Image (tube, rainbow, N blue to C red):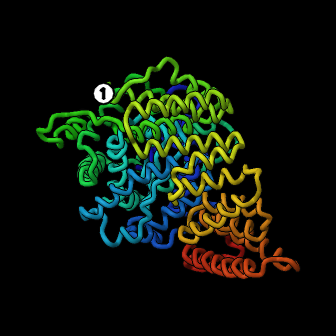
Amino acid sequence: MLKQTPRLFSRRGSAPRSVLPRKLALSVLAALLLVSGPRPGVAQVNLPTLGDSVSADLDVGAERRFGDQIMRQIRPDPDLLDDPILLEYVQGVWAPLVAAGIRLGNIGDETKDHFAWEIFLVRDKSVNAFALPGGFVGVHLGLIAMTVSRDELASVLGHELSHVTQRHIARRIVGDSRNSLLATAAMVAGLIIAARSGSVDGANAAIVGSQAAAAAASLAFSRDMEREADRVGFQVMTQAGYAPAGMFSMFERMEQSYHLMDAGNYPYLRSHPLTSERIGDARTRMGTEAFVRPLGVAEHALMAARAKVLMDPRAEAWAALQNLDAGVRDTSSKDGGKGYEQLGARYASALASIKMRDFTRAENALRSAELTLQLLGPDERASRDLRYLRAELAAAKGQASDGFAALAGLAGERSRPMLMQRAQLAMVDSSGTASARQAADDLQTYVSLNPHDPGAWAQLAQLWDRLNQPLRALRAQGEVRAAMGDLNGAIDRLRSGLRQSRGRDADQIEAAVIDSRLRALTYERRQLLAEMYPRGVPPGAELP
């Protein structure tokens, strides 16, 4: 859900503690200004369908455009993580939930076609997840790291999906008064100014007072909405094939962890308070079925471990994770799940060691993980993940041939993680440009089918640059910005490419492609400006 603004800062001391990472949080809050009306001295940006009164209905199209506006602010933030392996896994948990929502009728034809149904990762160690307008759902890596099964993760994602399908966000926006929105806008302005100046006192001052608190409270979902999201989310996750015990298990785990060790790391429990009523309801929904905590599987153990390493990029955090596998013993799968914990610990140690460039330690931990998986039994998905980690180690060492050898058993795979990993290896391949050319051709085919993938375009830009194809590299850089919603940046880069295409030796076919894309993006920007300024676009107006 969209988080309560006061929780941007901890109650325990003066240091800021963000529900989202600070820059990402401010991006979301700044986007709220789009529906808050004008303030003196500030250019007005209008959402087209909201009109002059927030009491008007927020239709599906307007909600999606609102979500797109917010995502345009979020996508450039470095705390928005594009890790191909981990993102693919979370998308694999998410997709069955969306499909179940369609089967149950929660996602009708209108929202199915208009909403994004996109899940994204936030590099933050707090246990949190949130829904945004238009079908966008963010997941903090800290949440993934603390789960022990797909079922537990699915219970949270199903809950957030239900906030979207039940139109809770739109209902809250429409139900709020203009005074509340204006108060939120004033508070957001204060937060942004304080963040830019680095003043913690200024930031805290921006959120005190009854007016700011009342405005922030209007962003929280009601208890009835939370109960509805629990009920609908439970139906969705069970329809998707996840264990019914997953929700109760997750509630129980989060509540225990929150009371035992919370230091501001559980914002999810503040905006989704786990009352005894809600926990009891989750148990009741299981019926007479005996509660059996969902056991982990090897793939989830590896991905939770990966999240644990990536959620905190500090060297001291990685150094601690290097020692996570110290003293663990090899066990079988009959030990109540301890084998999966040890598998995850060894994977985390290996990945953290790669990040620390301690390659000997990484190799030893990776071999231990491979042996542990053998003891646990055959698991194709987990074996694949370990192959990717070995290729990742080879790329970090600059030994492309070892990385390609690690991926040889997956030669027929054409997934996004495979394409991105091969591209990374090609960038460090000193044997020639053949691998880079093949990786570029493969990625070019991929982005032609998936043009809204900024990560793939960015990798492709690097490959074309290495292959001395400046026009193709510039075009890919422009497509990165377009995929992120930065039309101004995309147009600037394509214009630069068009100027370069006037050279004698320029690739005229690529120049024609750039010219065509430039015309299309210029038209798209003109249309967006017309929607934002329905009474006429002011001279010199630009997209935010």
Residue at the (74%, 65%) spot, across then down? 473
Left or right: 356 as drawn, with respect to 62: right
Q: Outermost residue toward the left?
A: 288
Left or right: 217 as drawn, with respect to 537: left
Q: Along the line of sight, which residue is nearer the eye, 412 or 170?
A: 412
Q: Label 1 crowding class (10 Å Cα cut-off): few <14, some 14-19, many 20+?
A: few
Looking at the rendered structure, the kind of residue marked 1 is: Lys
Relative height, residue 385 to residue 256 (above, below): below
Q: Is residue 224 visible?
A: no
Relative height, residue 296 to residue 25 (above, below): above
Q: Outermost residue toward the top?
A: 327
Q: Along the line of sight, which residue is nearer the eye, 409 or 228?
A: 409
In this figure, what is the number of numbered marks? 1
Q: Along the line of sight, which residue is nearer the eye, 182 or 309?
A: 309
Left or right: 520 as drawn, with respect to 335: right
Q: Quadrant where the C terminus lies?
A: bottom right
Relative height, residue 236 to residue 394 (above, below): below
Q: Along the line of sight, which residue is nearer the eye, 17 or 89?
A: 89
Instruction: Give coordinates of residue 230: x percent, y percent.
Output: 27, 47
Instruction: Give coordinates of residue 279: x percent, y percent.
Output: 24, 36
Question: Dividing the picture into quarters, in which one does residue 361 lie?
Answer: top right
Residue at the (69%, 54%) spot, across then down? 426
Residue at the (36%, 43%) spot, across then down? 150
Q: Tag 1's secondary structure?
A: loop
Instruction: Give coordinates of residue 283: x percent, y percent.
Output: 19, 37
Instruction: Give coordinates of residue 251: x percent, y percent.
Output: 31, 36
Q: Is residue 431 visible?
A: yes
Question: Dividing the picture into quarters, in which one does residue 203 lie?
Answer: top right
Which residue position is annotated with label 1? 334
Relative height, residue 257 to residue 528 (above, below): above
